């Protein structure tokens, strides 16, 4: 069963029965017999055979206190399956709910099962939607959720949404429904504008966190920043670097000044470096800072020449996370040197700087654990990272030019340098145009603690560019030597041998992404039959067909989803899966919006486990089998 819905099932019942809130072995109350003589042998024996009618309640109270210390979702899911009493008590004590797919369960079922929730995480569209592989307006609407939760959870404090569609009306309803609301986090969301933000910031007077990351916010002329309540605020985190609309800087400066608890502030490109200086002077206790444009100061400000940017950064003694630099002027980079030695996280994925400018910064970041950077730093820049950042745990290298078959600035040279210099690495995302098996094998040997390995060779079907061999042995070494690996993305020229390695050794892999890879259906069979922990499988532009698809019938109920686009599936093969697994939602998507599929070809198959059956908001280009 899919982990994200495991906690919604009643123990010892059919998995698809509605969750019950009452133990089936409870009996009606009966009159108590006359009490026997105190201290007699009969008393002791009867007490052993017939426990006090209050003993069950005592045990439940004890269990409630114990479960308060159980915070991990997997642990709580397991606890709910122990017995009916544990199932009921766990539901009453759960304050956080995670929904990995908004269509996997109905809002009403969640609110009935868990009546005392304070924090909700909901995810919508699958990840491949980020790469324009899913038509617009597919779904993932927040409206039904907020309407149901607004009535059931008056004490809700936190909402985290990822890849969801929400409207201004949804945000207004959220602000009106939850009087103690404190945290709103939106990641890769869309559909709303500054009017919706205005409702949240004006009505949620205990708001501590407003984080908007990679989220589209339309500008409808409303100056949302100025609608925060007057007086001291509770704000601890304000992130709006993705909001592409003008900002009332005077209102923002006033807000920062009256938010003494503010620790995280990430600004959009509308904030100039001169304005950044003024904000930093007002908030020297920031731990996380997104710099905004980091470009030319506003020419109309007569005090620009008096601004000592380096001194402003130097005064931020607590700063450990730095990002932004969306329109960076290299002349201002020396201003951040004074904080580099303290940084544990640095995001330069928007900073188009050359290798020398990058090296001037990175050579001072000895404590760095997380680094996001563009490939414009070249292999030489990654070699500087390897020489300096021995404690690095996560590295992401993004392409400045994502076109295929161009000369890429990073290669196996940079990857091997990182593997040799950063032995504590746990997660890597690496975009490049060429790679070798030797470099990937070296990483598997030098970084055995890898949990996430995502290698994206952008040219299609690219072999080892030195030997001309497939990249099978490199990825095979990763799954063989990195015993903690749970997430893997593969690309390049790969045969069924690579998939055989994954099926044989990838016993902990939970997420697998495949692009332009494989020989035949056999490759996917190896994975579906050999990876028992697999939860999310994403495949695009690969030669897998119906035989590969049906080979996973034994496992699909255990997965969160399967995505296959531009493969060799037929409608008949997808229909066979739908008939065999009726509790699976099998969606066929057409790349032509507003058109249903009218032949046997399948553009996109999106398949996921659902406790509520087919959704009722599917657009015309979606066919549900």
Image (tube, rainbow, N blue to C red):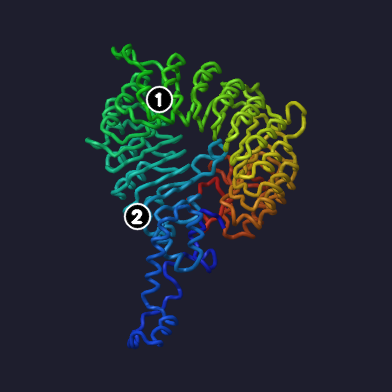
Tell me: 474 left or right of 581.
Answer: right
Front residue of this view, candidates 343 and 45: 45
Left of 584 or right of it: where is 204? left
Estimate how packed mark 2 is, as few (under 14), some (14 to 19) or many (20 or more) residues with alpha carbons within 10 Å: some
Q: Nearer the viewer, residue 620 or 449?
A: 449
At horizontal 75% and vertical 43% (from top left) the residue drawn is 496
Who is closer to the viewer here, 546 or 444? Answer: 444
**Residue 392 placement, left or right of 182:** right
The quadrant where residue 314 appears = top left
Q: Identify the residue at horizontal 45%, vertical 18% (top origin).
A: 333
Quadrant where the N terminus sits is bottom right
Helix, strand or loop at label 2? It is loop
Q: Position of residue 11 (x, y in %)?
A: 51, 66
Number of numbered discs: 2
Secondary structure of residue under mark 1: loop
C-alpha distance separating marks 2 and 1: 36 Å
Q: Which residue is mark 1?
A: 292
Q: Position of residue 92 (x, y in %)?
A: 39, 61
Can residue 243 be seen at all in this image of the molecule? no
Around disc 1, counting alpha carbons within 10 Å, would you say few (fewer than 14), some (14 to 19), or many (20 or more)?
A: many
- Label ID, residue 153: 2
Residue 281 drawn at (x, y percent): 31, 24
Depth check, front residue: 173 or 428: 428
Classify the position of the C terminus by image quarter. bottom right
């Amino acid at each position: 069963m899919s982990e994200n819905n495991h906690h919604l099932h009643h123990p010892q019942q059919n998995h698809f029965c509605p969750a019950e809130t009452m133990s089936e072995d409870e009996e009606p109350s009966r009159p108590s017999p006359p009490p026997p003589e105190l201290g007699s042998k009969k008393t002791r024996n009867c007490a052993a055979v017939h426990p006090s009618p209050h003993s069950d309640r005592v045990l439940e109270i004890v269990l409630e206190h114990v479960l308060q210390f159980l915070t991990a979702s997997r642990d709580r899911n397991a606890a709910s399956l122990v017995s009916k009493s544990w199932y009921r008590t766990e539901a009453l004590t759960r304050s956080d709910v995670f929904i990995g797919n908004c269509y996997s369960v109905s809002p009403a079922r969640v609110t009935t099962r868990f009546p005392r929730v304070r924090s909700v995480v909901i995810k919508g569209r699958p990840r491949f939607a980020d790469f324009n592989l899913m038509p617009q307006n597919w779904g993932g609407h927040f409206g039904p959720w907020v309407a149901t939760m607004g009535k059931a959870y008056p004490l809700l404090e936190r909402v985290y949404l990822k890849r969801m569609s929400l409207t201004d009306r949804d945000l207004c309803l959220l602000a009106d429904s939850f009087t103690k609301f404190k945290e709103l986090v939106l990641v890769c969301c869309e559909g709303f504008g500054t009017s919706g933000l205005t409702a949240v910031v004006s009505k949620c007077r205990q708001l501590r966190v407003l984080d908007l990351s990679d989220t589209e916010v339309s500008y409808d002329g409303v100056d949302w920043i100025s609608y925060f309540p007057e007086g001291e605020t509770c704000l601890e985190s304000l992130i709006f670097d993705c909001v592409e609309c003008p900002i009332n800087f005077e209102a923002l400066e006033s807000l920062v000044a009256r938010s003494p608890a503010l620790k995280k502030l990430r600004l959009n490109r509308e904030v100039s470096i001169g304005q950044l200086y003024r904000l930093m002077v007002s908030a020297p206790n920031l731990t996380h800072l997104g710099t905004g444009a980091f470009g030319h100061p506003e020419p109309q400000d007569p005090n620009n020449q008096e601004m000592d940017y380096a001194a402003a950064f130097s005064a931020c003694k607590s700063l450990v996370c730095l990002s932004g630099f969306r329109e960076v002027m290299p002349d201002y980079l020396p201003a951040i040197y004074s904080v580099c030695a303290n940084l544990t996280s640095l995001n330069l994925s928007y900073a188009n700087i050359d290798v020398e400018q990058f090296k001037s910064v990175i050579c001072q970041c000895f404590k760095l654990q997380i680094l996001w950077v563009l490939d414009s730093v070249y292999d030489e820049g990654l070699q500087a990272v390897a020489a300096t950042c021995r404690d690095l745990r996560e590295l992401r290298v993004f392409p400045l030019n994502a076109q295929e078959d161009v000369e890429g600035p990073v290669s196996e040279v940079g990857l091997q340098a990182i593997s040799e210099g950063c032995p504590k690495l746990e997660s890597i995302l690496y975009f490049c145009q060429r790679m070798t098996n030797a470099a990937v094998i070296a990483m598997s040997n030098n970084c055995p603690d890898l949990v996430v390995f995502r290698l994206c060779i952008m040219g299609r079907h690219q072999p080892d560019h030195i030997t001309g061999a497939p990249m099978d042995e490199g990825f095979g070494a990763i799954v063989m030597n990195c015993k903690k690996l749970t997430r893997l993305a593969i690309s390049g020229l790969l045969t069924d041998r690579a998939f055989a390695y994954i099926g044989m050794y990838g016993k902990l892999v939970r997420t697998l992404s495949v692009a332009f890879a494989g020989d035949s259906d056999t490759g996917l069979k190896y994975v579906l039959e050999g990876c028992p922990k697999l939860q999310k499988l994403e495949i695009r532009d690969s030669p897998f067909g119906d035989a590969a698809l049906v080979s996973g019938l034994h496992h699909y109920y255990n997965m969160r989803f399967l995505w296959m686009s531009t493969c060799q599936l037929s409608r008949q093969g997808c229909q066979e899966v739908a008939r065999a697994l009726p509790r699976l939602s099998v969606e066929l998507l057409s790349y032509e919006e507003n058109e249903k599929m009218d032949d046997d070809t399948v553009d996109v198959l999106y398949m996921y486990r659902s406790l509520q059956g087919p959704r009722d908001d599917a657009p015309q280009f979606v066919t549900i089998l």
